[in-house]
Image (spheres, rainbow, N blue to C red):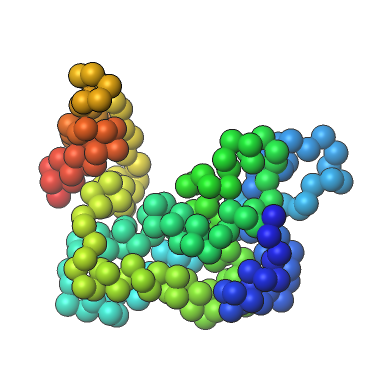
Amino acid sequence: MGNWADWQKNMGVSFHNPLLLQQALTHSSCANESTNFTSLPGPDNERLEFLGDSVLGMVVTEMLYHEFSDLPEGKLTMIRARLICQETLSSIAASLDLGSYLIMGQGETKCNGRTRISNLANALEAIIGALYLDQGLCQAKQFTLKQLEPLLGEIRAGQVPPDYKSWLQEYTQHNKQSTPSYRMVEARGPDHDKSFTVEVFVDQEMVGRGLGSSKKRAETAAAKSAWMKLR
């Protein structure tokens, strides 16, 4: 586990309450493995993640509203989805080396928990939530936009390809209060030349189907099909 003081120095932040930073970096697996309550490092980061998710969404939404004043709601929604999706957040967290600073149980560590996409994305959201509680919205906003700036620059330049999975998730959460789920229905061909068929469901209704040379590509194709249909 890395040194928190070094990380804060590198990030240009300094927590007034270091316990908030500790909580933001504490994975729930610590509690799951502990048999002695007094040995726990403190609360895990799930509540801070919940708060940070809302702060992140508000900060990004406000920024897009002002910066892209000529874009309609649908375009703004697509850009926001790309900026706050799990893949984006985990990539930022990895660039900040957050995995090295996570406090987690031995089982989660052995299962590559420090590089798991969900753990990294959740930790970044928890950091944003902790910073908001520690120093207010202004500092949380400054930190958040600084981390998103490289991707935002690519979006401004039109260099980022469509992310249909993120767009679909954003759309269904906003309009249907539901999250899409993917189901692989077929895998054909030899190992060196397989093709996969995936269906995507919203509220148990199949809304898209896709074919690809990998499960990920098939999911993307299914998401594109569903996005075009629903939009």
Taking the view exactly as shown, the residue that stands out farthest to the front is: 192
Q: Is residue 231 left or right of residue 144?
A: left
Identify the residue at horizontal 48%, vertical 66% (top origin). Answer: 55
74 versus 201 height, above or below: below
**Which residue is located at x 69 percent, y 66 percent?**
4
Task: Give percent across and percent down for residue 158.
Answer: 19, 68
Q: Quadrant of the N terminus?
A: bottom right
Position of residue 140 measured from the top left corner of the image (x, y, whole percent): 53, 74
Whether residue 114 is situated above or below residue 183 in the rendered picture = below
Total numbered labels? 0
Is residue 98 at all visible to an observer of this figure?
yes
98, above or below 108, in the image: below
Given residues 128 and 65, the one toward you in this image is: 128
Residue 135 image position (x, y, % from top left): 62, 77
- Where 122 falls versus 7 (above or below)? above
Q: State which quadrant residue 162 falls in.
A: bottom left
In this rendering, position of residue 56 left or right of residue 66: right
Left or right: 107 in relation to 96: right
Q: Position of residue 179 (x, y in %)?
A: 35, 41
In the image shown, does 176 or 125 lie closer to the viewer? 125
- Specify whether residue 205 is in view: no
The residue lying at 29 percent from left, 32 percent from top is 215
